[in-house]
């Protein structure tokens, strides 16, 4: 008999967590599970919901208001009561609104994927609710990286935390060894939401130094949207980098953009296990990234990418200049990364591990 699984996520707006959830639900074994997804907010204008419907995933959009929205508790409880899931799988801040409906709906098995370091996954209110959910109401946290699992144990005093590292559909990425003319500027791409923890300012500061050291040898593509976008634009203008930096906005064609680039830079102060790092490696592109979250679990420094300390402008500058000066070496590094991602971080492995987790008949209490 097929088990019914209901995922609850705040929003299907484009982002790492929503893309991962969409990929996972489309990859799960339909012979074993009937799958639904409930989004607290309205349906966004992107291709994620279309992909889910094409995969026969039942969708619920609750049209939550901004800020505290108490009536959403009732609407979510009605979804749970009607859908009657065997397994409830929660993501991000949705735990705030899901705990009470899950308890009242007597869902037998309750999971929550933690997508970033536990100290930073939600605010104090979210962490307060999580503590109760884990200790008293049978919710099991699942970490997307080993470092994330360690942070969950540290914050919530839990002894055992399952780890299912993120993965991607590696087959849609094509690793190509590009013959880059030495006089052609290196094109680096940065894909992230424009929010403080992504630290775009670090990239801009490093670019300013790189342009001084290697004029005419660097181009940067910034992909994403978010509240920090205006301030980053102003910083680019202040640093006189308008001819170096191009803002591409929010995009759905990340695989194609990676194919056009010569490498990925990620300057985050906080991460879980970012999909864009896996995507760049699958596309055969060298990655320069900060040593945060699960990134060091993917990148072998100096072999499959370059790791730098968070907020270290000089180290980032040096890494970019090295890429400019030693393109063949970095190209080989990118191709080595492809082999790692295909072997260890393919989406099929993620789906199989969640399938196994869903099929565990845990002794969780039903309150």
Image: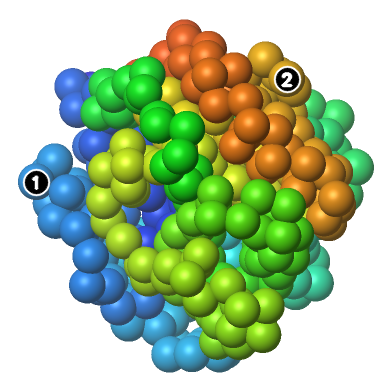
Q: Residue at x 40, y 32 (%)?
A: 181
C-alpha separation, residue under disc 2 versus residue under disc 1 = 41 Å
The location of residue 186, given as percent across then percent down, is: 49, 43
Q: Residue at x 69, y 41 (%)?
A: 321
Q: Residue at x 67, y 15 (%)?
A: 303
Dividing the picture into quadrants, the one containing residue 327 is top right
Residue 243 or 141: which is nearer the viewer? 243
Examine the rendered structure and indicate whether residue 364 appears above or below residue 227. above
Residue 299 or 207: which is nearer the viewer? 207
Q: Residue beneath label 2, please?
A: 302
Examine the rendered structure and indicate whether residue 254 appears above or below residue 297. below
The location of residue 286, given as percent across then percent down, is: 55, 29
Q: How is the image coloured?
A: rainbow
Examine the rendered structure and indicate whether residue 153 appears above or below residue 84. above
Look at the image and tell me whether residue 239 can be seen.
yes
Q: Which image quadrant: the N terminus?
A: top left
Left or right of residue 298: residue 307: right
Residue 171 or 9: which is nearer the viewer? 171
Tag of residue 54 = 1
Left or right of residue 316: residue 1: left
Q: Residue at x 47, y 10 (%)?
A: 339
């Amino acid at each position: 008999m097929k088990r019914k699984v209901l995922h609850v996520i705040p929003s299907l707006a484009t982002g790492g967590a929503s893309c991962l959830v969409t990929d996972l639900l489309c990859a799960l074994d339909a012979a074993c599970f009937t799958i639904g997804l409930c989004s607290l907010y309205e349906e966004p204008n992107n291709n994620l919901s279309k992909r889910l419907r094409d995969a026969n995933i039942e969708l619920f959009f609750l049209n939550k208001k901004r800020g505290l929205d108490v009536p959403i508790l009732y609407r979510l409880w009605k979804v749970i009561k009607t859908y009657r899931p065997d397994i409830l799988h929660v993501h991000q801040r949705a735990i705030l609104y899901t705990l009470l409906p899950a308890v009242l709906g007597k869902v037998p098995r309750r999971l929550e994927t933690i997508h970033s370091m536990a100290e930073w996954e939600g605010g104090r209110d979210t962490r307060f609710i999580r503590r109760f959910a884990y200790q008293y109401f049978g919710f099991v946290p699942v970490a997307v990286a080993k470092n994330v699992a360690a942070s969950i144990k540290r914050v919530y005093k839990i002894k055992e935390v399952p780890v299912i590292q993120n993965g991607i559909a590696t087959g849609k990425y094509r690793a190509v060894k590009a013959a880059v003319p030495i006089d052609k500027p290196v094109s680096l791409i940065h894909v992230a939401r424009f929010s403080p923890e992504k630290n775009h300012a670090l990239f801009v500061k490093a670019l300013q130094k790189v342009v001084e050291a290697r004029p005419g040898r660097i181009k940067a593509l910034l992909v994403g949207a978010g509240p920090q976008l205006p301030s980053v634009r102003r910083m680019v203008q202040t640093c006189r980098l308008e001819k170096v930096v191009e803002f591409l906005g929010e995009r759905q064609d990340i695989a194609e953009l990676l194919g056009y680039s010569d490498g990925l830079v990620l300057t985050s102060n906080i991460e879980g296990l970012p999909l864009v790092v896996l995507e760049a490696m699958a596309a055969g592109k060298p990655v320069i990234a900060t040593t945060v979250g699960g990134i060091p679990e993917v990148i072998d420094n100096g072999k499959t990418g370059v790791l730098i300390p968070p907020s270290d402008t000089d180290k980032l500058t040096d890494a970019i200049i090295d890429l400019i000066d030693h393109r063949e070496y970095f190209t080989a590094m990118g191709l080595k990364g492809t082999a790692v991602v295909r072997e260890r971080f393919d989406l099929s492995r993620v789906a199989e591990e969640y399938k196994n987790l869903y099929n565990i008949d845990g002794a969780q209490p039903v309150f």
